[in-house]
Image (tube, rainbow, N blue to C red):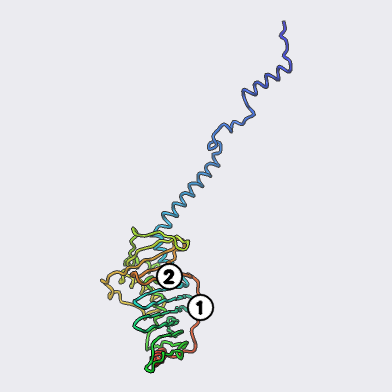
Amino acid sequence: MSMPKKSSSTKKATTAKKNINTPKNISTQNQVPFLIAHKVATLYVLSAVVFLFAGASWWKHVYNSPHRVFDAMLSNNLSTSGVTRETKNQQGGSNIDKIEKISFVPESGAHSLVDIKQNGNGANSDVQTETLGSITADFSRYNRIKTSQKNAAGKTLDYSSVQGIWGKSVPGESQPQYFSQAVLGIIPFANLNAETKAKVLKVMADKKAYTVDYAAVKPLKIDGKSVLVFPVSVDTAGYVEALNLIIESIGLQSAKLDPAQYKGQPPISITLTVDKLSRHLLEATISGQQKETYSAYGITTPLQFPDKTIPVTQLQQKVQAIK
């Protein structure tokens, strides 16, 4: 007896049942974890994460380490085309504010404005002097002289006749000093070539010109900048040895000092505030009294030296003659 043939409807039902039991229409890839199914993509992602983590760690613990920030600051100061420094000093009844613009663009020089206000002993004074200094000459003048002092006739002294007159240093009578004083501060500035800068930094390190108490370094935020505050002691003998190299390189031979004269002197205590990102020195406090702030790194304007002058000794005689 022959078996009855299955109808087409029965075949369709059986096929549908098989499709339900073994879902070939579903990709087997979807049943595997993503990390295994996408090995190449996963490796790229993991590599990027590791790279970012390592970069952040390097930035925080290596690039921004106090040692690197301090050393880079010293190096930057010796490779700048210019800087502006403002100094504030209070002593007794005197307030002295000084703004210096130091330029290493030919012709190298320094321009300063100094405001001196004195109160006390029944006499008040308000004086502003302006100076210009190059490697070869010094210029100075009085922009303002106000005083409560009176002459023998009871009249207030009038200095208007000497204001605005430029006095110039005369070769043989005095050595130029304004530029050297501006450049050779407690933290020197210059625009040295790579070889000379390396020598200066080596002397600073070998002679321990600057000793930093890294355990006491403090991180702060100043005007939105992340900074580090360094307590530093300055060995004057080692500092002078480094200065002499700078003096030779920029042609200030007359400003050279003898390091032997500073041997055994107590160190000078200073506090330096440095921007972590730019490695620029922002502030310096010297012996807790004098405060200096620094800005406008690399911004320079060629200095214009006066043509019409008188000898500076003659200018001083004119001032002293007012009675």
Q: Residue furthest bottom?
A: 153
Q: Left or right: where does residue 160 sit relative to residue 27?
A: left
Q: Which tag is nearer the camera, tag 2 or tag 1? A: 2
Q: Residue furthest top?
A: 1
Question: Which residue matches tag 2?
Answer: 293
Q: Nearer the viewer, residue 1 or 317?
A: 317
Q: Residue 59, relative to residue 204: is it above or below?
A: above
Classify mark 1: helix, strand or loop.
Answer: loop
Displayed quadrant of residue 214: bottom left
Q: Position of residue 42 (x, y in %)?
A: 53, 41
Displayed quadrant of residue 177: bottom left
Q: Nearer the viewer, residue 43 or 239?
A: 239
Mark 2 or mark 1: whose residue is earlier in sequence = 2
Q: Residue at x 34, y 69 (%)?
A: 288
Q: Nearer the viewer, residue 122 or 95?
A: 122
Question: Which residue matches tag 1?
Answer: 302
Number of numbered labels in the structure image: 2
